[in-house]
Image (tube, coloured by chain):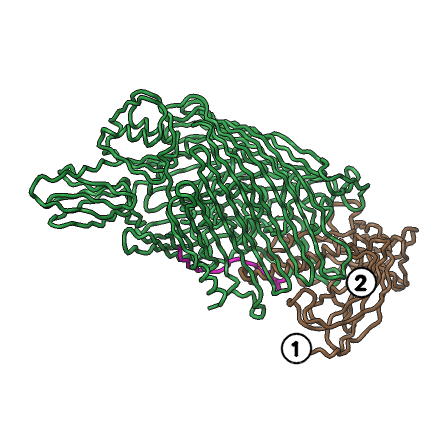
Amino acid sequence: MKKIVYLLMVIGASLILFSCEDQVELDVPEGPKRLVIDGSITSLNERQSVILTQTTDFNDTNLVYIQDAVVKIIDDEENEYTLSYQGEGLYETAESVQGVIGKSYTLVVQNEGKEYRSSPVEMQPVPAIDSVRYYFSEQFPLGSFFDPGYYTAVEFADDASTQDFYRWRLYVNDSLQTNIIIDDDENTNGVTFAEDDFIIGRTLRVGDSIQVEQIAITRQMYEFLDLFNTQANNSGGLFDTPPAPVLGNMYNVNDNKEVVLGFFGAENIQVSNKIVIEDLGFEIEEQ
Amino acid sequence: MNRQFILFLIMTFSVMTLWAKSESVLMEKVNLPQGTHNVTTILKTIEKQSQVRFAYDNSLRVSTKDVHLHKSDWKVKEVLDHTFRRTNISYVNKGAHVVLVAKAEKVETPEAVKALYTVSGTIIDAVTGEPLFGAGVQVVGKQKGASTDFDGNFSFRLEEGTYELTIKGIGYVAQKRNITLNKDVVLNIELSPEVNIIEGIEISVEQPDKNIQSVEMGTVKMDIEEIRKIPPVFGEVDIVKSIQTLPGVTTVGEGANGFNVRGGAIDQNLVLLDEAPIFSSSHLFGFFSVFNSDAVQGLELYKGSIPAQYGGRASSVLDVHQKEGDYEKFGLEGGIGVVSSRLTLQAPIVKDKASIIISGRRSYADLFLRLTEDLSDNQAYFYDLNTQITYKVNEDNRLFLSGYYGRDAFNFGDLFGFDWGNSMASLRWKHTFNDRFFLNTSALVSDYDYSLGGDDFFIWTSSIQNYQGKLDFTHYLGKKDSTETYQHKLTFGASSILYHFYPADVDFRVSETATDISLPREDAIESAIYVGDEWKVNSKFSMTLGLRYSSFLVLGGKDLFTYQDNVPKSVETITGIESYDENEIVKHYHGLEPRIGLKYSLDKVSSIKAGYNRARQYLQLVSNSTNGLPTDIWKPSDNFTQPLISDQVALGYFRNFKDNMYETSAEVYYKWQQNVLDYKNGADLFFNPNLEQELLEGQARAYGLELMVKKKKGKLTGRVSYTLSRAERQVDSEFDEERLNNGDYYLANQDKLHDLTVIASYEITKRFSLSTNFSYATGRPFTPPASKYTYQGVTLAHYELRNNDRIPDYHRLDLSATLKNKKKKPTQRWESSWNFSIYNVYGRRNAFSYDFQGGENGLVNRISILGTVIPAVSYNFKY
C-alpha cells in the first residue's frame, strides 16, 4: 500500500513538466517553543536513553538541548528508573534495564516546573529474523525510477494471531540509515514474507556490510512514525498532503492542549547478523 | 517530425465534411387573439410563443401598420404571409431569425426601347466575411431594388443609365455606390457592422436588460463566442478557466483540479454536461478542463439562486450544453494547437429532421514534450469525444441523444499506468403539450473511473456509476402583461439517481501479498421532487419561490463497525460489527430545500434583488491533497457522516447604462454550511475500509462582496470584476484528535481576500482583434512551519495551525491576438484564423506552494506552476 502512495508521488514529480522550482527567502511567523522527546525503552539489556530538545526557529541551524530536566521511566509495577543528563540532550539510566514483553512503561519528564508524561507503552513480541538477503535488480521495485543495483530484504514469519507493527533499522557499513522503515501486517497477516522496502537513497554495492534490526512497535508508534514519514517526505508538490503537526504520545499533565513533540516508545528488537554483499556477477554502471 | 505526430495529423485531415447551421421555425404554431392588432404586437407575441426572433429596420415603419386576424390558430409562416400580404414588407428566414425587409420590386416587362442590364452581386459582413441575408440594394429615386438571399446574393434588372445605389443591412453602416449601366454589372459589397449595435442578431435572442429584469441573481450565462475572447492557456480555449474569471469563482492555484464558487469546496459544484453529472472536470490534473470548446454551445453557472430543479451540491451548478448538429448541411470545424487538436463534424441524418454532431480532441504534448530523455516510451495524454444526435419527431416532440467519453492516461513504459476519465450518455425527450405546457424527460447514465497499476505489480480500479431518471415540467399560467410575459412560470418535476460506488478493486499481479485489500461496493439512491414558480407580481416586483424535497437512501451490502458513543472513532473504540443485506436500507436522510428570490425594479435601468437558498449535498469528496487528485474519494453520507447542509442569503443591486451598453452589478452574500467533511491531521485515506476513523465533521462559512462592470457592445468589450471575500472552516470537539486549530475558525484553502479580473477584447480591424486578461488575487492560505526539530536523526518542520499564513499575492497578464484569414471570394465557406497567445506575459513566478523540507541555507524551495512566459499558437478552421 505504501508503494501505491509512493507511486502517486512519483507521478506528481513528473508534473515538473509544468512546474519549476527555485529557492527564495520567506519570512514566516515564529511559533512557540515546544519540548521534543526522542527515545524508547528497548528489549536489549542496556542503558535506556531518551533525548530531550526544544524546537528551534525554522531558519535556525543549531539544536537547543534541554539540560535540567528530571527524567524517569516508570513501569506498570511502579518500578522507577531515573535517567540522568549526559550532555547534548541525552538522558540515560545508570544501570542496564531490559524491557519485558507485556509490560507497560511510562516516561515522566519534569522541566521548568511542568510535568510531562507519555501514555503507557507496552512491549510487543517480535518474530525472529529468518534471513537477511540481498539481491540484484535492474529496477527496484517500481520500475525505472530506481537504479540497477543490489537491494536487501528481511525474511520472517508474521504471527497470524496478532496484529503486528514493525520497524526496521538498517546499518550499512555500521552506519545507521536515517530512513524510518515501517510496515504493518494488515495485508500479510500470518505470512512469511520478505520486507523489501529499504529505499535508502542509493543502491547497495559489492563489499557493503549490512545489518538489520527488526523491531516490534505499538500501533500508536507505527501511526506516529507513518505520519512522521509522510510529513518528512512532503515536498509541497501537487500530490503531497497538506502539512500537519506530527503529534505523539507525550502530554503536559496540567495542560493537555500544550503541544509536545516526538514519541516515547517500546521497542522489542531482533538484531540480525552482519552480512557482506558479495559480487553476484552483475555489472553496475557507476554514477 | 515525430512519426506519431504525423500520423495524427493525417488522421485529423483524412476526415472532412461540411458545416452550416439552420432549421425552420416558420412551422411552429402560435396562438393569436382574433381582432385587429398592431403588427409590432403580433411580432412580439410570436416571439413569446415560438423560437422565432425578429429583426427589422425602423424605416419599414412596422409600428404604423395594423392587421386584422380572423382566426387565432396560426403557423408562423401563415401569420406572416397574412400580415405582410398587402404591405411593402417581405421577410427572410434563417435559423430562428426572421428579418423583415422592404419588398423587392417585381421586374416589369420592359416596354421601353432602352436595353436592360442585370445588376447582381453579393453582400458580405466585412468583419466575418459571412454572407448577409436580408440586406437590401435600393436604387435612389426609383422603385427598384432587391434584397439578398441566404447566400448574400442579389440580382435585379435595370435600364441603361447612371444610378446611385444605397446598400443597407440592419445593424450595418449603409453605403452608397454610383454605377453606370451599359452592360451587366457585378457588385461585391462589404458592409461594416455599426459600432453601437450589438453584433449580429444576438440582441433578439435575449433581452439586453435581462440582468435587471429577471429575478435570478448570481447567475452567469456565457456562450462559446464570449469564452473564446478570453486569452487561452497554451492556446486551449477552456471552459472552466473562463468561469474562473468571474466574480466569486476562484481556483486554489494553477493546475488545481476544479473550481471554487463563493468559498465552497470543489466538490460543491454540480457539473452537468447535457444534464449528466461529471465527477471530475479536469484533464491533466487540472491544467485543462474536460470540455472541448468546439463541442460546447454555452453554459450557465448558478452561484446564488439555484433553481429548484437542481440539487445535490451545495455551492453551484455549472450546466454545460453541447452543440446540436446541423439539420441541412455537412459541416466541419477544427483546430490545431500546441497541446491538442480538435475536429468536429456535423451532418443531417434526415434533412430538417435529424442531425448528428461528433467532436473529438486529443492532446499530443507527450509526443514532443518528453518526460525525460531516457524515458522515451512514457506517455501522458488526454482525449475526449463528444456527440449529440437530435431528432425532431414532429412539431411537439424532439429527441436528443448525447454522449461523452474522455480519458487521461499516463504510461510509464509498459510497467505502470494511470488513467482516468468520465463517460456519459443521456437520452432526452422534449414534449410540447400546448403552447404553455412543456415536458423534458431524461434518462442518463454517467461514470467516473480510474485505473492505476501495471501487469507486473497490481491493478487498482475504482469507479462511480450512476443511473438517473428525470421529469421536468414547465407550465405558463395566468394573464399576460404588456410585455407579453405570463404572470406565472410554474416548474415542477422529479428525479432519482442510483449510485454504485466502487472505492477500490485491487488485483495483485504478484504473489507476495495474500490479503485482498479491495473495498466493497457502496450503493445509494438519491431522489427529489420539486416545484418552483416564477411569479411576476406586477411590473416592478417579481419573485421566484422554489421548494425541493430530497432524500438519500444508503443501501446495505457491506459490514459496518459500530463504535462506542461520544468518543472518537478508532480501532480501539470499535464495539462490534453490524451486517446489512444487499439493498437493505442502512440510513435514510431527507429534508426540504427552500429557494426564494425577490426582484424589485427601481426604474427601467436598475433593480434590487434578494435571495435565500438551501441545498443538501449527500456526496462529499474526501481529499487530503491541496489541489485535488483523480484518486480523491467521493464519499456518500452513511451511518457516520451526515449530508452537508448549505444555506445562502444574497442581496444585489443591478444597473445598466447607455442603453444596456454597460452592465453593472454589486452583490453581497453570506453562506453557512453544516457537516462539512474534513480529515484528521495526517489522515490515511487510501484503501481505508473504515474511513470514518479518519474523517471529521465541521462547519464552514463564507461571505463576500462581488462587483462587476461589463461593456457589451462596441469595438472594445470586456469586463472588470472584483471580489472581496472570506471562506472559513471550523472543526471543534472535546477531543484533541477531533479538533483542528484549537477548534477556532480557520481559513479554507480556497479563501481569497481580494480577487480582481480584467478582461478586454479590442477589434482593431475587421480581421484582427486583440484580447487581454489581467488577474490579481490575494495569495491562498497555506501552513508555514512554526518551528523545526530533530527526531531519530531526521529534521522535520513543525506545523501548528492549518492555513495560518498566505503565499504571496498572485498576479498575471495574458495577451492574445486573433487574425482571421482573408476570404478569396466573399461567398467562400472556408473560414480560418490564427490565434497567438502569451500566457503570463511578464513571466511572474507565482508561488503554488513552498517546500520547507528541501530548502538550504535558510532558503525554502518555491514551487511555481506555469511560472514562466508561455507563448502558444493555434490554427482554427471552419467549413
Find out whether residue B198 is within the magenta segment.
no
The magenta span reads: B854-876
Left or right of residue B625: residue B546: left
Could you say which quadrant of the image residue B268 lies in?
top right
- Of the residues under marks 2 and 1, which one precedes in the sequence? 2
Q: Amino acid at mark 2?
A: Phe
Rendered position, A173 above or below B33: below
Q: Chain of mark 2?
A: A
* Drawn side of residue B242 relative to residue A29, left or right: left
Q: Which mark is residue B374?
A: none
The image quadrant that residue B857 belongs to is: bottom right
In the picture of the structure, the residue carrying the numbered disc 1 is A285
Q: Let me know if residue A67 appears in the view.
A: yes
Tell me the residue at 58%/59% (across/down): B410
Seen from the viewer's position, the closer of residues B10 and B551 is B10
Q: Chain B's shade in the image?
A: green
* Chain with colour brown in the figure: A
Q: How many marks?
A: 2
**From this viewpoint, which residue is outermost toward the left?**
B113
Nearer to us: label 2 or label 1 = 2
Density class for disc 2 (Cα within 10 Å; few <14, some 14-19, many ≥20) is some
